[in-house]
Image (cartoon, rainbow, N blue to C red):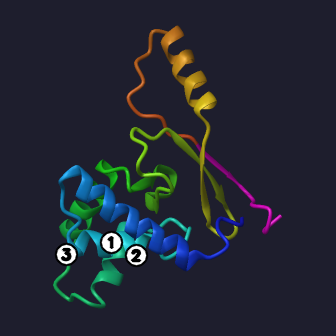
C-alpha cells in the first residue's frame, strides 16, 4: 500500500502541522506529546500504546502507562491521531486541521499498513441512514481488512 513517496517528509509535515495547530488553538504540544506523536508517525503501521511505552522508555526509563495514555488522549482530542479500534492501536491523522473527522481505514492484514480514507459522501450516507432510523450516531468506526496492492 503506497501511502507516501517520502515518509521522512510525511513525518516532518505531520509534526510541523501539529505544532502549528496547537499554537493556533492556544494549547501546548509538550515535548512528551510531540515525542509520542513522532513515534506514531514513524510508519503508517498502527502502533499499540504499550509499544509506544517501550519506545519512550528507551529515552525516559521513568515513563509509565498513564503518561502514554494521557498523551494519546490529548492527541486524539486534537484530531492529530486516530484509534484503530479493531487493532487497539493508533495511527497519525493525515488532515488534523479538519475536525470532526469521519474517516475509515483500509488495513492490510499482511504488511499491517493502515490507510486513512475520507469520503464525505460515505459519511453523509451513514449519517442519513442513522437519522432515517431515529438513531443518533455518536462515533462511527469503519475499518476494512484485506490486502493492499503491494501484498496481493
Which disc, if any, is residue 36? 1
Query: Disc 3 vs disc 1: which is toward the camera?
Result: 1
Residue plotted at (38% across, 28% down)? 138
| Element type at mark 1 | helix
Compared to 97, does 30 lie above or below? below
Q: Is residue 124 left or right of residue 84?
A: right
- From the top left corner, tell me how far across and down residue 31 is, in percent: 22, 75
In the picture shown, does residue 124 fall above or below 68? above
Residue 74 visible in this rendered orientation of the protein: no
The residue drawn where x is 41% and y is 34% is 139
Tell me what residue is drawn at x 39 percent, y 74 percent. Answer: 38
> Which segment is the magenta one?
143-152
| Measured Cα–Cα span from mark 3 to mark 1 | 13 Å
Marks 1/2: CA–CA distance? 5 Å
Does residue 71 show up magenta in the picture?
A: no
SS for tag 3?
A: loop
Do the CB atoms of the residues marked 1 and 2 lie less than 8 Å apart? Answer: yes
Residue 102 or residue 130, whichever sits in front: 102
Determine which of the numbered discs, if any, sits on residue 39 in the image: 2
- Tell me which numbered mark, 2 or 3, is placed earlier along the sequence: 2
Q: Quadrant of the C terminus?
A: bottom right
Q: Which of these two is toward me, 102 or 87?
A: 102
Dot placed on the residue nearer the N-terminal end, 3 or 1 = 1
Q: Quadrant of residue 51?
A: bottom left
Picture quadrant of residue 50: bottom left
Q: Is residue 148 magenta?
A: yes
What residue sits right under mark 3 in the picture? 64
Disc 2 secondary structure class = helix
Amino acid at each position: 500500500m503506497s501511502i507516501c513517496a517520502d515518509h521522512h517528509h510525511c513525518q516532518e509535515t505531520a509534526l510541523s502541522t501539529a505544532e502549528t495547530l496547537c499554537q493556533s488553538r492556544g494549547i501546548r504540544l509538550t515535548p512528551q506529546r510531540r515525542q509520542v506523536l513522532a513515534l506514531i508517525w514513524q510508519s503508517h503501521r498502527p502502533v499499540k500504546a504499550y509499544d509506544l511505552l517501550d519506545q519512550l522508555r528507551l529515552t525516559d526509563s521513568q515513563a509509565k502507562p498513564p503518561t502514554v495514555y494521557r498523551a494519546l488522549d490529548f492527541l486524539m482530542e486534537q484530531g492529530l491521531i486516530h484509534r484503530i479500534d479493531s487493532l487497539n492501536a493508533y495511527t497519525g491523522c493525515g488532515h488534523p486541521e479538519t475536525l470532526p473527522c469521519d474517516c475509515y481505514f483500509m488495513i492490510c492484514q499482511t504488511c499491517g499498513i493502515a490507510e486513512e480514507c475520507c469520503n464525505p459522501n460515505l459519511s453523509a450516507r451513514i449519517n442519513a441512514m442513522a437519522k432515517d432510523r431515529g438513531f443518533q450516531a455518536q462515533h462511527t468506526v469503519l475499518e476494512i481488512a484485506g490486502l493492499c496492492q503491494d501484498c496481493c
